[in-house]
C-alpha cells in the first residue's frame, strides 16, 4: 500500500522567531488560579485565588485584588469551572476599581442537580486600557462556596497580559 501525500508537514510561522528577536521579559503578565474550591470573600464577594500566583513586577496581589502598577493596554481572560452536580446562581464580572467591565459579564444559573462528576466551564475575555495603580478583581453577585468534585481540579483562573 502506497503512503498518501496528503499528510504534509505545515510549518508554523512562530517557529521562525529567534531568541534575539523575542525577549520574554518584555511581556508583563499575571496568572492566578484556585484549585479544589470556588469561593468568594464573604464581605466583598470577590473570587479568592488560593494557588500560588505567577506574576511579573508590574502586578501585585493583596486581599483578593490584583494591582496593576503600570498603565497600558491589557488582555484579560477568566475561566470558571463549576461542578455540574452543584447548584449556583450568580453573575460574574471583571471589575476595575469598583467599575464593572462591559463584555466581561457571565450569568451562571444551574438549576438541575445531577449525580454526574464533571464540570461546566464559563469563560470570557476582553482587551482594555488600564490606568496605573488600578485594582482588578473578579466579582460575584452572590457569595460562592463550592468544592470541586475531585482533588486538584482548577475551579477558577484569571490571566492578564500587558499587550501595549
Image (cartoon, rainbow, N blue to C red):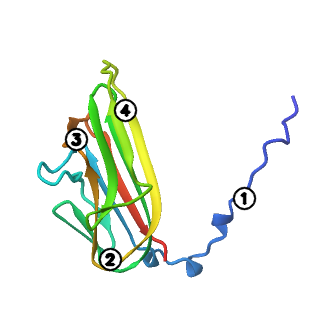
Q: Residue furthest right?
A: 2
Secondary structure of the residue carrying tag 3 is strand
For marks 1 and 2, give the one nearer the viewer.
Answer: 2
Question: Taking 35 as reference, is 16 above or below it?
Answer: below
Residue depicted at 16% across the width and 54% down the height: 44
Between 132 and 29, the residue placed more toward the observer is: 132
Secondary structure of the residue carrying tag 1 is loop
Secondary structure of the residue carrying tag 2 is loop
Work out how far the residue at label 4 is from the one at label 3, CA to CA, in angstroms.
13 Å
Q: Which residue in the protein does label 1 denote?
A: 11
- Left or right? Give the position of 114 relative to 15: left
Counting from the top left corner in percent of width and height, residue 120 is at 39, 34
Q: Which residue in the protein does label 2 denote?
A: 58
Q: Earlier in the sequence, mark 4 or mark 1?
A: 1
Label drawn at residue 37 = 3
Counting from the top left corner in percent of width and height, residue 2 is at 88, 33
Determine whether label 1 and label 3 are within 8 Å by CB. no
Q: Which residue in the protein does label 4 denote?
A: 119
Q: Earlier in the sequence, mark 4 or mark 3?
A: 3
Work out how far the residue at label 1 is from the one at label 3, CA to CA, in angstroms.
41 Å
Q: Residue furthest top?
A: 115
Determine whether label 4 and label 1 are within 8 Å by CB. no
Amino acid at each position: 500500500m502506497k503512503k498518501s501525500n496528503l499528510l504534509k508537514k505545515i510549518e508554523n510561522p512562530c517557529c521562525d522567531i529567534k531568541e534575539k528577536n523575542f525577549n520574554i521579559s518584555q511581556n508583563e503578565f499575571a496568572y492566578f488560579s484556585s484549585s479544589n474550591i470556588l469561593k468568594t470573600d464573604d464581605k466583598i464577594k470577590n473570587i479568592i485565588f488560593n494557588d500560588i500566583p505567577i506574576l511579573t513586577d508590574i502586578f501585585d496581589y493583596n486581599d483578593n485584588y490584583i494591582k496593576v502598577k503600570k498603565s497600558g493596554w491589557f488582555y484579560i481572560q477568566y475561566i470558571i469551572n463549576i461542578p455540574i452536580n452543584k447548584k449556583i446562581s450568580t453573575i460574574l464580572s471583571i471589575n476595575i476599581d469598583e467599575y464593572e467591565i462591559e463584555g466581561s459579564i457571565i450569568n451562571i444559573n444551574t438549576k438541575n442537580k445531577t449525580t454526574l462528576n464533571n464540570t461546566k466551564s464559563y469563560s470570557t475575555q476582553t482587551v482594555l486600557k488600564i490606568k496605573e495603580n488600578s485594582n482588578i478583581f473578579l466579582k460575584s453577585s452572590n457569595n460562592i462556596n463550592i468544592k470541586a468534585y475531585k482533588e486538584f481540579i482548577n475551579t477558577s483562573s484569571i490571566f492578564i497580559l500587558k499587550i501595549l
